[in-house]
Image (tube, helix red, strand yellow):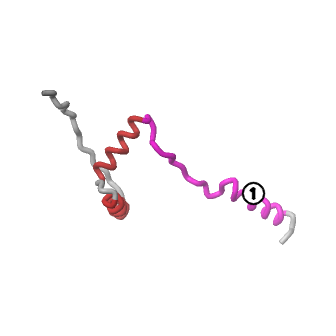
Amino acid sequence: MAKEAIIATTSIKIRMDKNMKKQAEALFSKMALNMKTVFTIFTKAVARCNKIPFKIATEPIFNEAKRDPLRKVTKELEAGKD
């Protein structure tokens, strides 16, 4: 009979927005998951990939697609065009 490995566990405490927690729990529930399981899945993916397993990015308010039209209008205004 093989012995089962005993895994040491620890507790963590996370503070987050109350509404965000409710929204997340509602979504996880639809997937038959809970917060603990989702966090465990996430941390295992981080450990396996040695990085956050998805892209984290912000869209600048004035990204290049928005800058070009603004530059054009600015030049027109500076040139005295309406």
Farthest residue toward the left? 1
Residue 65 as seen in the image, left or right of residue 11: right
Q: Nearer the viewer, residue 55 or 68?
A: 55
Farthest residue toward the bottom? 82
Farthest residue toward the top? 2
Question: Is 46 a magenta residue?
Answer: no
At a point 30% along the width and 53% down the height, the residue shown is 35
Number of marks in the image?
1
2 to 12, vertically: above or below: above
At a point 23% along the width and 40% down the height, the residue shown is 10
Q: Quadrant of residue 33?
A: bottom left
Instruction: Check disc 1: other Cα within 10 Å, few if <14, some if 14-19, many if 20+.
Output: few
Residue 39: x, y in percent? 33, 47
Q: Quadrant of residue 62?
A: bottom right
Residue at image mark 1: 68
29 to 1, vertically: above or below: below
Of the 4 image quadrants, the one containing the N terminus is top left
The stretch in magenta equals 49-78
Q: Amino acid at mark 1?
A: Asp
Residue 75 as seen in the image, left or right of residue 19: right
Residue 54: x, y in percent? 48, 45
At a point 36% along the width and 60% down the height, the residue shown is 27
Residue 41: x, y in percent? 34, 44
Q: Quadrant of residue 82?
A: bottom right
Q: Secondary structure at mark 1?
A: helix
Q: Nearer the viewer, residue 35 or 59?
A: 35
Question: Is 75 a magenta residue?
Answer: yes
Residue 5: x, y in percent? 19, 30
